[in-house]
Image: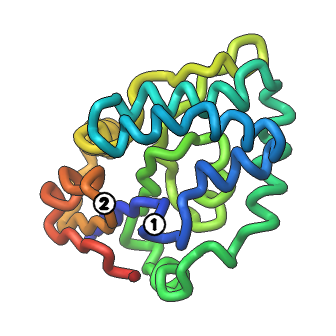
Amino acid sequence: MKKLYCFDFDGTLTYKDTMFMYLKFYDPAKFRLQFLKHVPLFVLLKLKLAETEKVKKSFIGSILKGQTQEKIEKKSKQFFEENYPKIVRENALDFIQNIDRDHTNSLLVTASLDIWAKPFADAFKMQLVATKAEFQNGVFTGNFIGKNCNGKEKLVRIKAEINDNKYDKIIAFGDTSGDKPMLKWANEGHYQFFH
């Protein structure tokens, strides 16, 4: 029996949202300044009066735009080494470590940027399906390649990833409304399973 596991990352497998953690780790002073500047946007976001993708792009770009890919990847590796496995829920880690790798495929499906999610996906032995950072000539442009990987976009990306592979069972794990389309589509959708 061939299974496909689709795991959301932030909040589902981790205790915290890694975006804020990573950006703060990358440049604490710049993070504080830009966080304060973005508070009005975060408020609009909570009130559903701003687009998640735009606010996210603006905030991430305000800290990482113009940084070299080399520096960003180095920082991502350090961030991973400092926070793995302590930010990962223990029961989620147990579950992942006990997956039968011979008959399953596992995807880490996240709205987080591939920049800092990749080392975690590698540690989990999963393929990464994430929001993609755009680099030009080895420098981060502040833009994404394609859309923010959340909500319906998660499904679009999963389907593109699995192509025509047939699975007997698809099992998904998520913890927010942004995971609902993926959870509904799967044969088995688990909401806040590891909480």
Secondary structure beneath label 2: loop
Which corner quadrant holds the N terminus? bottom left
Which amino acid type corresponds to the residue marked 2 in the rendered image? Thr
Q: Nearer the viewer, residue 129 or 176?
A: 176
The answer to whether residue 96 shows anywhere in this view is yes
Q: Residue at x 48, y 42 (%)?
A: 130
Residue that extends furthest to the top in the rendered view of this protein: 137
Q: Is residue 85 left or right of residue 193?
A: right
Q: Position of residue 63 (x, y in %)?
A: 72, 31
Q: Is residue 2 left or right of residue 54?
A: left
Q: Which tag, 1 or 2, sits closer to the chain's start? A: 1
**Which residue was labeled with disc 1?**
11
**Which residue was labeled with disc 2?**
176
Which corner quadrant holds the C terminus? bottom left
Residue 98 vertical position relative to residue 186 in the rendered view, above or below:
below
Q: Nearer the viewer, residue 13 or 42?
A: 42
Q: Residues within 10 Å of mark 1 (few under 14, many from 20)?
A: some
Mark number, residue 99? none
